[in-house]
Amino acid sequence: MRSRIVRRAGVLALAAGAALLAGIAPASAASGDGSAYGIKVDVTLLGVPAVHAGPLAAASTNGPTSDSLVSAAVPGVLTAGVINTSAHKDTNTGAVTAAASTADVTVPLLAALGPVGAKVIAAKCAATQAGETGSTTLTDAKLGSLGTLAVNPAPDSTVDIKLPVIGNVARLTLNEQIHNPDGSLTVNAVHLHLLGGHGVGALGDGDVIISSATCGPAGLPMPVASGAGLWIGLGLLGAIAVPVGFAAKRRRTSAATAA
């Protein structure tokens, strides 16, 4: 009879311990992901073989969580100085952040407009339980004869790139924000889209992206037992553990007496 009580109490103790630990264990749902890169080029220029480069200095929450390059050059398309990227996930809150910055950018592809480039082109994003946000910062950015660009352009700002006589050859999107089907947000600080065409002066077709960051959606936060729930769990565990120890002691004493 006593051994049955001991076993039953032991099972209850294990159940209480499991319930308490369940409140401390991480959530089973996977956290959100994040990524970033400095430059990606996929273009076909007139009279030139297709050019594919990047993503350069790619970082991801799955690793590496940061990356950098001292410089980068895609002949005939662009040059850049230091590229820094990062992507991090907070396993306690589920929040995801990512950022990319590309310095000393020049775009010889658009040389017909005059000097085109920027001191720094940066994108960042964040995903929390409240949702996803992103922004772009352009430092000392110039578009040749078309003038300077805003430091913090509004999401999805566009500029048509026109050449004399020829007309539109490209479209520039600043602070491009793409809401992906999986719930994540991609922020492309600068996205140059070549419109194609085969006439004299046409540039070609394809895309050039400078500084890109993707976040989210945020993962579930890690639940941790706290407050009244923690003390109730500990009290229940203690209340069961004491009788178990007492019953076991009594059984050992009785056995010794009988011997």
Image (cartoon, helix red, strand yellow):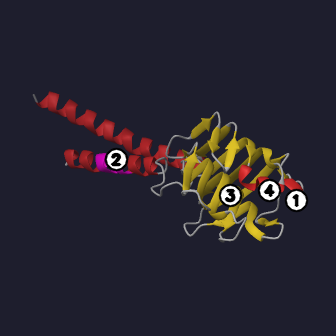
Find the distance from the CA under tag 3 to the CA under tag 4.
28 Å
Q: Please give the name of the residue rendered at 73% of the width and 47% of the height, measured from the top-left corner.
A: 122
Q: Which residues are magenta?
A: 9-15
Query: What residue is pinned by disc 2?
Result: 14
Marks 2 and 1, the one that precedes in the sequence: 2
Say whether residue 152 is visible: no
Find the distance from the CA under tag 4 to the CA under tag 1.
11 Å
Of marks 4 and 2, the one in the foreground = 4
Q: Please give the name of the residue rendered at 48% of the width and 55% of the height, measured from the top-left corner.
A: 30
13 in magenta: yes
Query: What residue is pinned by disc 4?
Result: 112
Specify whether 4 is left or right of 55: left
Who is closer to the viewer here, 116 or 95?
116
The picture places residue 87, in percent across and down from the top left corner, at 60, 45
The picture places residue 138, in percent across and down from the top left corner, at 80, 49
Position of 158 relative to 56 (above/below): below
Label 2 crowd (10 A; few <14 / some 14-19 / many >=20) = some
Marks 3 and 4, the one that precedes in the sequence: 4
Of marks 1 and 3, the one in the foreground = 1
Check contact, mark 1 vs mark 3: CB within 8 A: no
Query: What residue is pinned by disc 3?
Result: 187
Q: Secondary structure at mark 3?
A: strand
Specify whether 164 is left or right of 25: right
